[in-house]
Amino acid sequence: MAKRIDVSDLNVYYGQFKAVEGVTMTVEPRSVTAFIGPSGCGKSTFLRTLNRMHEVIPGGRVEGKVLLDDQDLYASDVDPVAVRRTIGMVFQRPNPFPTMSIYDNVAAGLRLNGVKGRKKLDEVVEKSLRGANLWNEVKDRLNKPGAGLSGGQQQRLCIARAIAVEPQVLLMDEPCSALDPISTLAIEDLINDLKSQYTIVIVTHNMQQAARVSDRTAFFNLAATGKPGKLVEIDDTHRIFNNPSVKATEDYISGRFG
Amino acid sequence: MSTITGVTAADETPTPTSGSPLGGDAAGTGRLGDRLFGGLATGAGGLVVALVTLIGVFLLWQAIPALAHNEASFLTSREWSVGGDHPRFGIVELLWTTVASSLIAMALAVPVGVGVALFITQYAPRWLSRPAASLVDLLAAVPSIVYGLWGVLTFRAAVRPVEDFLQSKLGWFPLFAKTGISGGTIFFIGIVLAIMVLPIVTALSREVFAQTPVAHKEGALALGATRWEMIRTSVLPFGRPGVISASMLALGRALGETIAVTFIVSTLSPGNPWSWSLFNGGETFASRIANNAAEFDSPQKTGAFIAAGLVLFVLTFVVNAIARIVIERRKAFTE
Ligand SMILES: Nc1ncnc2c1ncn2[C@@H]1O[C@H](COP(=O)(O)OP(=O)(O)OP(=O)(O)O)[C@@H](O)[C@H]1O
Ligand SMILES: [Mg+2]
């Protein structure tokens, strides 16, 4: 079910402001691709264009092409709602629906898809929570509010919520930045498990994390504040960290930056 | 304040009186400024409680002697002759008119108000939502006599065909039974009250809807929710306590509205036959008291009217208490 993403010559704007310029890259299926780069270089902005979440922001728009396998995501007959059902997203801060129970949080996406049968829901909720390594911790309190979990558990709940609808791609925007090292490791393990089934894109500020979890790494940079961010290079993670072809990448990774 | 509105933004912040950890924080004691402000805040809180208690006691104090002399059943009688040696008065008609007209107002104003608030915050383009919001806020400030005048002079004619239609089609149902009255029916008053409280419901709902955290909305949208599904899964649950308190505030206003109702309502003459029809006339607590303000010449008469006022007081109190309970329930789940 995992699919490849092909981006060609993508520009992203917020109103008149060009935030990201000229990105061309391929995201391989059943692999983890990490986005790294300094703050404000447009990693989140670019990530959101991959499931059209940028359209939620007033003034957000793109030029260019994004193909999911061979389907153009921006074709005029493509419904952004359908795109987001295929390409799930996990945010920086865990955002479970506060008024819903753990169970309902995981089931929310299915219910949006019109799944009603209790049995089917039970099944998927358990499978997704197991998939997110959360089942054992919450199986006795599925009807308790999701907001009552710890931050790390909430983030795994959000991942369970995202994978419950069986997306083809999972986008994660700094999913561990609000978590402690142990929860972070739990999520990284999870990402490792998930990549056999999903195409995963993860934004991170943590170099070790990028090196640990990803197969390919993309380095973004921006010339100066107010200038658009650009993709500097994308390559195998191993090469990016050991032998990058661009000097700026090496400077950034080794901490000699700016 | 919060006893009136049900819930406010301040509900989220623990107050010293609620016995929260912050209230007992040792860091907050000792300094002159802290003690001064603490004393003032406690004093203000105490004053409000004392005022409400005093009003209740005053009403009760004045009402009891009159109730003791009442020769009819206060709760079930329709009679209202408060002069002379044998006063007979009961509130059933007042209660019915008040509650029925207010419920009609709520049934119309809450869905429409919530809808308008959702439109302004979630659907309208930005150039439209700001002026629309200001307009609604402006409407909330229109004095009620204006609504009364407009209701009688202009709006009456527009509602009459609706009333005729309902009476002819649904007249078999007691609530819609035909009556001879074509002036200020309970139904019509309900509609005018609805228009009057609509801006309140809209303005307060709009405020809470607009505060829905972006993270909740994006959580829903990223799951592939349509705009309406996003509203259902994140905006409405988040705004629910606010909508409830807005409705209660509006209901309180509707229950107690005096000028517009007094101006519009068709009072029933004493011998008039009773019916449950919404197309009957009648009087609300507030309009009965206002219409007879000139009669407050003996403690006996005054006491009877105050007894009616007391019921209205209790009614609004109960409404607020229910709202509180509903909101607390939701909150327990959210935290
Ligand atoms: N909602 C928005 N409206 C307007 N401009 C925005 C918006 N969000 C981001 N930007 C701008 O777009 C540029 C890229 O921001 P973005 O959030 O994508 O950076 P980032 O690489 O994710 O940074 P960080 O690592 O700090 O998360 C920045 O200049 C930012 O100011
Ligand atoms: Mg970011």
Image: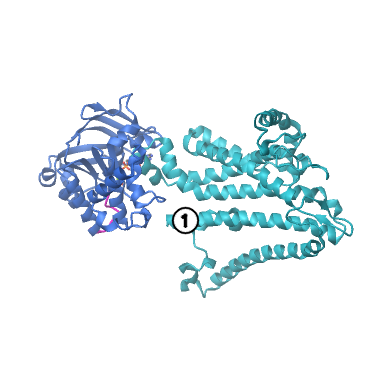
Chain colours: A blue, B cyan
Q: In x, y percent, where is residue B130? A: 54, 37
Note whether residue A228 is visible. Answer: no
Q: Quadrant of the N terminus of chain B?
A: bottom right
Res A114 quadrant in image? top left
The magenta-colored residue range is A175-181
Camera-side residue of B89 and B240: B89
Ligand 1 occupies quarter: top left
Disc 1, SS:
helix
Camera-side residue of A195 and A65: A195
* Label 1 CA crowd tier, 10 Å (few <14, some 14–19, many 20+): few
Please tell me which residue is depicted at 10% across the width and 47% down the height of the picture. A242
Left or right, B312 with respect to B244, comes to: right
Identify the amino acid type marked 1. Lys
As drawn, the residue found furthest toward the front would be B172
Q: In x, y percent, where is residue B200? A: 61, 44
Camera-side residue of B288 and A186: B288
The residue that disc 1 covers is B331
Please tell me which residue is depicted at 45% across the width and 44% down the height of the picture. B235
